Image (cartoon, rainbow, N blue to C red):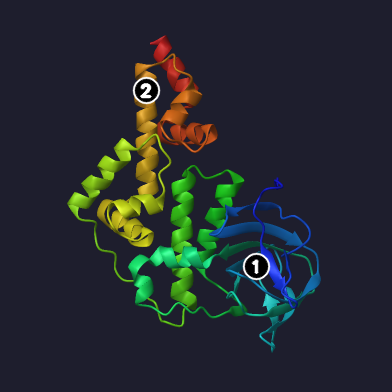
Amino acid sequence: MVEPSSPRIYIRTADRARVPYFSAPPLVVGGRTGLYVFEHRAVDAGSLDAHTFDADVLMLSLGAQAVRFRSRLNGRQVSGLIEPERFRFLARGDTLSTRWDAPVQGLFLTLAPALLAHSLGDDIDRWPMELLSHILPHQDLILCHLLKSIAACFAGSAVGGLLFEQSLLTATAVHVQTRYSTGRLSHRSAQPLPRWKQLRLAEYIRAHLGQELTLNELAAVVRLSPYHLARAYKASTGRSLWQTVLESRVNEARRIILARADLPLAVIAKDCGFDSYGQFIAAFRKFFGLLPSEYRDSLRTN
């Protein structure tokens, strides 16, 4: 359900007015002001007059059939088929008008300049960051997986929480710059995180487990960009940083239940830093195969 205060994707019309991308509310929406907006939409056949975005936008087509479209990108005619599981990319500031001949459904993600820049950290100074629109539908399996994972976060079917969401966004931002940048940005092999940095991270996570931990915050602890931390940590340990934090929280919750079986589970979830009580339940069951309440009841019967 879309809440009145939820973020929305906006466009600029030819007279520079700022209006919602579509007047009807999306099926699902989420995001963080100034960084990104995600929308899952279903729209009838129709058209949009010339418009621009203040952020770069990814569009992933869903559904079962291809839909014919005709567009003008900066005055240049482009036409073809919007096929399922194919992307269109529009760089911020470029002008697009478009018409489509049948109902379409898709995932839309806008990435603000601040998110794109911060994802690369110091590398932003070494690479031109001009992005080029690619309106002809094309395949990108990595982006497809990332956007569907972001969609799962807002559908409530992902247990990773805020840190998982941030990891997905960072990976998406870097991949967009890799694929659409004029600067030929390329992935370099991830270097393992030095042992002393792994220990510093582990100590910091333990000390702040009950607080909100963000990827930016953890990256600052070891003086890396969020992207390079995520890659280096996985190269060193074989697992994602968000998985480590989630498992640490679940193990701490289990320890507290063992020590304080009378403590309300909602209090334990909050003290261990879970984003929500629902995430606590889902994560505990994922790691231990039981609901927290079932685990506590099993202790009382032994």
88 on left or right of 197:
right
Camera-side mark, 1 or 2: 2
Residue positioned 28% across, 57% down in the render: 223
Q: Residues within 10 Å of mark 2 (few under 14, many from 20)?
A: some
Q: Where in the figure is residue 58, as x and y percent of width and height?
A: 59, 68
Residue 256 seen in this snapshot: yes
Residue positioned 71% across, 74% down in the render: 16
Depth check: give the residue in front, 171 or 205: 205
Check the image and name the residue furthest to the top: 301
Quadrant of the image occupied by residue 81: bottom right
Q: Where in the figure is residue 264, as x and y percent of width and height?
A: 48, 19
In the image, residue 132 above or below residue 84: below
Circle 1 sits on which residue?
Answer: 84
Amino acid at the residue labelled 2: Ile
142 on left or right of 237:
right
Q: Where in the figure is residue 250, as x and y percent of width and height?
A: 39, 33
Circle 2 sits on which residue?
Answer: 256
Amino acid at the residue labelled 1: Pro
215 on left or right of 188:
right
Q: Residues within 10 Å of mark 1 (few under 14, many from 20)?
A: many
In the image, residue 78 above or below residue 108: below
Tag shown at residue 193:
none
Name the secondary structure under disc 1.
loop
Quadrant of the image occupied by residue 247: top left
On-image quarter of the N terminus? top right
Mark 1–mark 2 Cα distance, whole angstroms, equals: 47 Å
Name the secondary structure under disc 2.
helix
Q: Where in the figure is residue 178, as x and y percent of width and height?
A: 43, 74
On-image quarter of the C terminus? top left
Check the image and name the residue furthest to the front: 16
